[in-house]
Image (cartoon, rainbow, N blue to C red):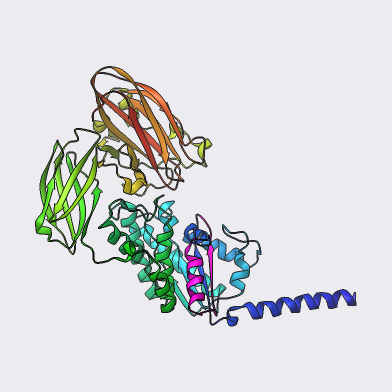
């Protein structure tokens, strides 16, 4: 017994010794990052973590330890539970099984970054109302308090607004995340924390590159930054840590095209419209006068006006209708010329709340059916159908690669129109003109890595399809044969939604079809 007691005592002493000499006090600075899948990705051989560590080593800052704690899908609320569990559960971890959260928190930190918010908008767990934002703010404040208690050695807590969600800065989700960033600034003032504007830097670099390359993407899946995005984040983290020499190393290794903030150029972004027959393009111009802008419209469209906005921004307003599935608008200013695709629109209805369900197998299509479906089956134009005695509100949605990550003229990213709350559904409508009666192929494809959608599709008042498309449940894509009549055909769908992304392609293959 005595021998066993001594052995146990020695093990305990060794553990305490190890903890003391690997804790925050063993470094001039120990840094923890509390994050989601972007932070988990940063632990790969190309993410911001190895970039930060290499830059620190290159400038001789070997007394700084940088440890990201990343867990895919994490929100502010889920991290509240994670931090609580880490107090007693040694097995709490994120995407990287070798990084144990309890161990890392127990070792303490001098600096603590909170890099969250993407999944709050993506899932979403935030309601874009004053009450919804207030609830999210309260949860964020609670997380700061909990982390201060969990890591009492932390001298600095830095809040990082999340990077871009889709690559159209004017899409609904990005506008919502801009508001979340403003709330985080309020929180920083109230909770004696600091702001590190990762979102602003990613957006600044992105918009800068777009001026010279309108096909540039920082986030191919609309969520996770590429290696160049991680470079910008590594540079931003190092600057926030006060490691200017290491930050300069990262900046100097960026490609020239990423850091060229002087070249003349123009970027263009397609917006949706609240009015049929109208569309807008938002642009940025550098190196030329906005007064010199000219616009060449495709057949069916005419220029209404070019509006001069603040700074380098402007807006092009067009009216007309699509004569083909895809056309091009040409915009010039002096020697600068840019073309942007103008795809034929869908009509997307207001979003309707639905009955909660758990995963694809428990989805009940009948529970999302409304009197609009009855009207469609009765032969009513869906755009004229009423719900609870009132017409539905419709958005004229112009497909674009910036919100789906793919150059597809027949795709809808519902969550770029509105929040896309869990279990909601929406109706879509497209009118198709056929030169003859013919059988065509309709392809249904779930886009993005986390879409789980449930389309019920109607053609000229007849239901032709009802199933789930998802990369994670059942099948990513499907196709059916449908019958079109000569002349105008109405294709409509009620599309249910589980959570996370909500982007679906509805592509027709037939002879000489027109919008």
> Is residue 55 highlighted in magenta?
yes
* Residue 296 shown left or right of residue 485 in the figure: left
* Residue 187 shown left or right of residue 397 in the figure: right
Q: Is residue 135 visible?
A: no
Q: Which residue corresponds to the image point at 42% horizontal and 73% vertical from the top-left?
A: 249
Closer to us: 84 or 107: 107
Quadrant of the image occupied by residue 98: bottom right
Q: Which residue corresponds to the image point at 43% horizontal and 59% vertical from the top-left?
A: 227
* Spot occupied by residue 108 in the image (x, y as percentages of width and height): 58, 76
Q: Which residue corresponds to the image point at 14% horizontal and 44% vertical from the top-left?
A: 318
Note whether 349 is above or below 372 in the view shown. Answer: below
Q: Can residue 2 be seen in this view?
A: yes
* Residue 165 shown left or right of residue 467 in the figure: left
Closer to us: 66 or 338: 338
* Spot occupied by residue 60 in the image (x, y as percentages of width and height): 51, 80
Q: Which residue lies furthest to the top in this view?
A: 437
* Spot occupied by residue 427 in the image (x, y as percentages of width and height): 33, 36
Note whether 142 is above or below 94 in the view shown. Answer: below
Q: Quadrant of the C terminus?
A: top left
* Spot occupied by residue 482 in the image (x, y as percentages of width and height): 36, 22
Q: Which residue corresponds to the image point at 24% horizontal and 48% vertical from the top-left?
A: 271
> Is residue 295 highlighted in magenta?
no
Q: Give the range drawn in magenta.
A: 46-72
Q: In which quarter of the image is the N terminus?
A: bottom right
């Amino acid at each position: 017994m005595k021998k066993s007691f001594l052995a146990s005592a020695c093990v305990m002493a060794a553990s305490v010794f190890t903890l003391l000499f690997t804790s925050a006090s063993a470094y001039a600075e120990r840094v923890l990052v509390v994050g989601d899948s972007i932070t988990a990705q940063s632990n790969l051989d190309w993410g911001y973590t190895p970039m930060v560590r290499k830059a620190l080593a290159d400038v001789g800052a070997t007394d700084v330890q940088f440890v990201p704690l990343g867990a895919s899908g994490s929100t502010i609320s889920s991290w509240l539970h994670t931090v609580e569990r880490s107090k007693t559960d040694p097995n709490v971890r994120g995407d990287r099984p070798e990084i144990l959260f309890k161990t890392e928190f127990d070792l303490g930190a001098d600096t603590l970054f909170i890099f969250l918010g993407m999944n709050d908008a993506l899932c979403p767990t935030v309601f874009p109302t004053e009450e919804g934002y207030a609830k999210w703010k309260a949860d964020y404040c609670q997380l700061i308090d909990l982390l201060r208690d969990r890591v009492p050695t932390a001298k600095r807590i830095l809040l990082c607004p999340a990077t871009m969600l889709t690559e159209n800065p004017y899409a609904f989700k990005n506008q919502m995340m801009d508001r979340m960033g403003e709330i985080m600034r309020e929180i920083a003032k109230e909770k004696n924390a600091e702001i590190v504007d990762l979102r602003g830097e990613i957006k600044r670099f992105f918009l800068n590159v777009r001026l010279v390359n309108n096909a540039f993407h920082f986030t191919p899946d609309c969520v996770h930054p590429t290696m160049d995005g991680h470079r910008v984040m590594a540079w931003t983290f190092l600057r926030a840590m006060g490691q200017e020499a290491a930050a300069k190393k990262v900046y100097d290794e960026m490609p020239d095209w990423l850091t060229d903030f002087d070249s003349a150029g123009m970027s263009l972004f397609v917006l949706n419209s609240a009015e049929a027959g109208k569309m807008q393009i938002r642009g940025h111009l550098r190196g030329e006068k906005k007064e010199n802008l000219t616009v060449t419209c495709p057949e069916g469209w005419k220029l209404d006006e070019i509006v001069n906005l603040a700074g380098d921004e402007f807006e092009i307003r067009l009216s007309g209708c699509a004569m083909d599935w895809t056309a091009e608008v040409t915009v010039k200013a002096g020697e600068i010329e840019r073309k942007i695709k103008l795809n034929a629109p869908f009509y997307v209805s207001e979003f309707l709340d639905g009955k909660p369900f758990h995963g694809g197998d428990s989805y009940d299509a009948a529970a999302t059916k409304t009197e609009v479906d009855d009207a469609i089956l009765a032969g009513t134009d869906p755009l004229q159908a009423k719900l609870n005695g009132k017409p539905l509100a419709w958005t004229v949605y112009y497909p674009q690669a910036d919100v789906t990550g793919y150059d597809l003229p027949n795709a809808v990213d519902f969550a770029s129109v509105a929040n896309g709350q869990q279990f909601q559904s929406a109706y879509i409508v497209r009118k198709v003109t056929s030169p003859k009666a013919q059988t065509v192929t309709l392809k249904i494809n779930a886009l993005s890595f986390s879409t789980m959608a449930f389309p019920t599709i109607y053609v000229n008042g007849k239901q032709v399809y009802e199933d789930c498309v998802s990369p994670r449940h059942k099948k990513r894509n499907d196709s059916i044969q449908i019958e079109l009549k000569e002349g105008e055909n109405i294709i409509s769908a009620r599309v249910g939604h589980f959570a996370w992304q909500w982007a679906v392609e509805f592509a027709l293959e037939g002879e000489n079809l027109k919008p």
